[in-house]
Image: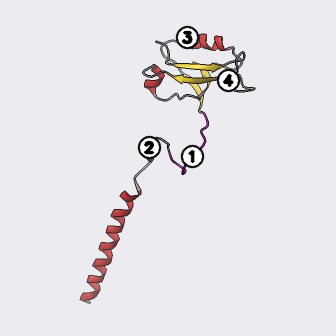
Amino acid sequence: SGLGFNIVGGTDQQYISNDSSIYVSRIKKDGAAYLDGRLQEGDKILAVNGRDLKDLRHKDAVELFRSAGYDVSLKIQRRLQPQNGPVGHRGDGESGGLPLAAILVPGLALAAAAVWILLRYRQRM
């Protein structure tokens, strides 16, 4: 069923003005690229199996993908995404690390216990 993604671009149908590069326009659900998970819509494809895609017509790029074989190596340039929200926000509803409470609550409990022990120790002196 192919590689599981569609492309746009080429010297004869530029996707971005003054840029004849090849871009991923769509990842097909349950296709090879979707199941692999690394390729993203908007990625620029620089090479397929070591073959540079620079200055190719769209149909020549499509043919190159169709004849790529079973084991395919892509060299890509990740699309640039505007950063919305705080630094490190992934935008998928999940944080990138531990919640702040998971660090603060045990730390505060430990500090409170240390103060309590210190006060009790001083009273005995």
Say what secondary structure mark 1 lies in.
loop
Q: Earlier in the sequence, mark 1 or mark 2?
A: 1
Disc assigned to residue 15? 4
Between the residue at mark 2 and the residue at mark 4, the CA separation in whole angstroms equals: 31 Å
Q: Amino acid at mark 2?
A: Gly
Label 2 crowd bin: few (<14), some (14–19), many (20+), radius 10 Å = few
Residues at discs 1 and 4 in contact (Cβ within 8 Å): no
Q: Amino acid at mark 4?
A: Tyr
Label 1 crowd bin: few (<14), some (14–19), many (20+), radius 10 Å = few
Residue toward you, 1 or 113: 1
Residues rendered magenta in the picture: 79-89
**Residue lying farthest bottom?**
125
* Residue at the image point whose x is 51% and y is 12% from the top: 69
* Residue at the image point whose x is 58% and y is 45% from the top: 83
Between the residue at mark 1 and the residue at mark 4, the CA separation in whole angstroms equals: 25 Å
Please say whether residue 33 is visible from this viewpoint: yes
Q: Earlier in the sequence, mark 2 or mark 4?
A: 4
Q: Earlier in the sequence, mark 3 or mark 2?
A: 3
Disc assigned to residue 66? 3
Q: Is residue 73 above or below residue 62?
A: below
